[in-house]
Amino acid sequence: MFKIIANVRQRYRWALIAIALLISGSALLLQYGFSVQKYDAKIINMAGKQRMLSQKIAWHSNALLSSRIDVATHTNSLEHSLAQFKTAHEVLLTKQGSSYRYLTPELVKLYFAEPANLDSEVNEFIAQASWLLYQKGEVDTQVLNVVHVENLLAKLDRAVTLFEQHAVKKVNRVSNLELLCWLVAMVLLLVELRFVFMPMEKEVERTLTALQKQKDFVAQMSQNKEHFIARASHEFRTPLQGLITSIDELTIDSEQQNIKTQASYCALRLLSMLDELQDLQALSTGKWAPILKNENLLESINKVVLAYEYAAQQKGLTLITHFDESLNCFCKLDHQRLQHVLTELISNAIKFTDKGEVEVAANMQNSQLQLTVNDSGCGFSSEITELEFDSFKQTNHFQGLRTGLTRAQYVVKALHGSLSFKNNAASGAHVTLNLPIEITNQQTEREVEKSFFALWLKTTN
């Protein structure tokens, strides 16, 4: 599974990198196209302005030649227009190395080749207007007359047309490049679809199919296990019951009574193990539901603790209990399952404690039962955040079939509680049970009858 994830991630990264590069190239191309259009618009505007300035220069020049009215106004306007016309002409003819920066071959031919020779004609036009403006010599009025100016305007119009055509060619080139990028993007997407996403989809589908088969196989194995445990429990239980009955009916002398007791104990232990397996199966498959009863909580806990006082004494251990008065209440709970959980906790504490004491404490706060079991035994070899259901992963703190605490965990979860395990500061284990409790403080009719009967016996005696 991890291999396919790595493979899919690698292919997806390469696809994203290719798309990112293509998008970046397209964005740069668009930026270049915008800058070219902006720059060409500036040049075209400058070339178009040359036509207007040539007309203004001719008009002011002819006004100065034919009339002496408003001489200062015409002179200032002529000087300003002539300066702009000359500057624009120099910019249009800017050189970049050995070639012209803004001129195409057609424009070079228009400006410098015969018969147009626009550069010479513009320079002559500027020179004659300057001589008139600054009175440097005799002015050739033919250069400034209407016919000559119209001829100059025609050539300037031709220059503007060529500049526009050159700009249109650039725009078309950029447009073609953008179209090419779009086509490349489409081809790239098709390639990614064919060689990246389709194989990726097939690989994912193949892996999911294999995982589904494994899941079905595991489910079938689990179902087979359930059926096997049910059949085995049924098949083993009948001969075991017969064996127990036969042992009980044996008539033997007193010297062999211990052997009979041991055989009876072993048979009963086998029957108990079958009950454990069947109970665990019911808990793990969800075929169990709590049976709520309204009983006294303190009495339910004391029944378990009292049963283990003798076992603690046999091992030389001290069993200490601290039960708060708040536990002396009636509550609706699966008391039998709670006793089972407490049995497992105390049993394990005694089993793995060789000397010292086992302490059981419980109290009730805000309808929450908190019960702790502390021992001075070997403790846990590592921190336990949650009990492992797999017996091969459990610590050596649990022995036997290793189903007791697992069943306890299922029960606690079904009752919406929690179990926590940790080591004490000095030595031993510290187990905490938290369980929500529905307190009723009401005795059932049967319990009332028991109370009255006990009171009656007390008074009669």
Image: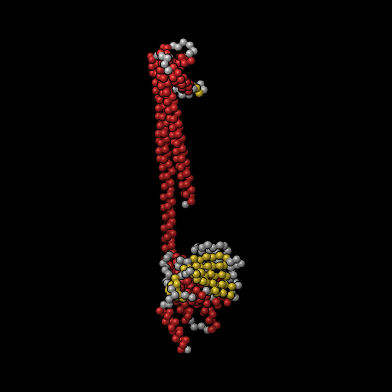
Q: How many circles with numbers are drawn on the protein?
A: 0
Q: Nearer the viewer, residue 218 or 453?
A: 453
Q: Who's the residue at 47% across and 89% down the image? A: 461
Which is more toward the observer, 318 or 454? 454
Q: Is residue 397 above or below residue 252?
A: above
Residue 330 image-quadrant placement: bottom left
Query: With respect to residue 361, does 20 lie above or below?
Result: above
Q: Is residue 324 visible?
A: yes
Give the x, y percent position of residue 407: 48, 67
Where does residue 386 sit, x and y in percent of width and height?
A: 51, 63
Most distant residue in the top direction: 138
Furthest residue in direction front, as rendered: 69
At a point 44% along the width and 11% down the height, the residue shown is 140
Of 116 and 303, the residue lying toward us: 116
Residue in view at x 43 percent, y 83 percent: 452
Q: Return the x and y of residue 457 as percentages of the image width and height.
A: 46, 86
Q: How is the image coloured?
A: secondary structure
Instruction: Give left or right: position of 5 versus 383.
Output: left
Q: Nearer the viewer, residue 387 or 441?
A: 441
Rendered residue at 60%/72% (across/down): 356
Residue 116 visible in the shown view: no
Quadrant assignment, res 278: bottom left
Question: Whole-percent x and y of residue 444?
Answer: 41, 77
